[in-house]
Image (cartoon, rainbow, N blue to C red):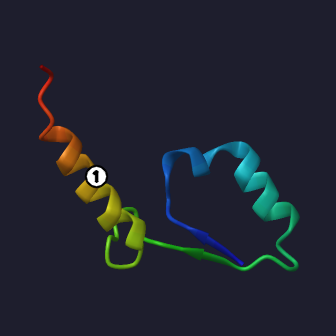
Amino acid sequence: MLVWDNFRLDLTAGVREFIDANAEWLTVFQLPTHAPDLDPTEGVWSLVKRDIGNLAAG
């Protein structure tokens, strides 16, 4: 099983070839491009980016 979050690097030819070559046994669940409710890491990255953005160079 592959849960595909549509990250740009995932669109490379190598990944597509892997999916095609293993279609017999590989099930792909493709998430919408921006779906924070389906991809919990989106919420984590949102918090990290907010905190990093609030840091001031001294």
Query: Which residue occupies the extreme front position in the image?
Result: 58
Would you say 47 lies left or right of 27 here? left
Would you say 29 lies left or right of 40 here? right
Q: Quadrant of the N terminus?
A: bottom right
Q: Residue at x 50, y 59 (%)?
A: 6
Q: Secondary structure at mark 1?
A: helix
Would you say 50 lies left or right of 16 here? left
Q: Position of residue 2 (x, y in %)?
A: 67, 72
Q: Quadrant of the C terminus?
A: top left
Would you say 34 lies left or right of 53 here? right
User: Amino acid under label 1?
Assistant: Val
Q: Position of residue 17 (x, y in %)?
A: 79, 53
Q: Residue at x 34, y 70 (%)?
A: 35
Q: Residue at x 59, y 49 (%)?
A: 11
Q: Nearer the viewer, residue 55 or 19?
A: 55
According to the picture, the residue beneath numbered tag 1 turns out to be 48
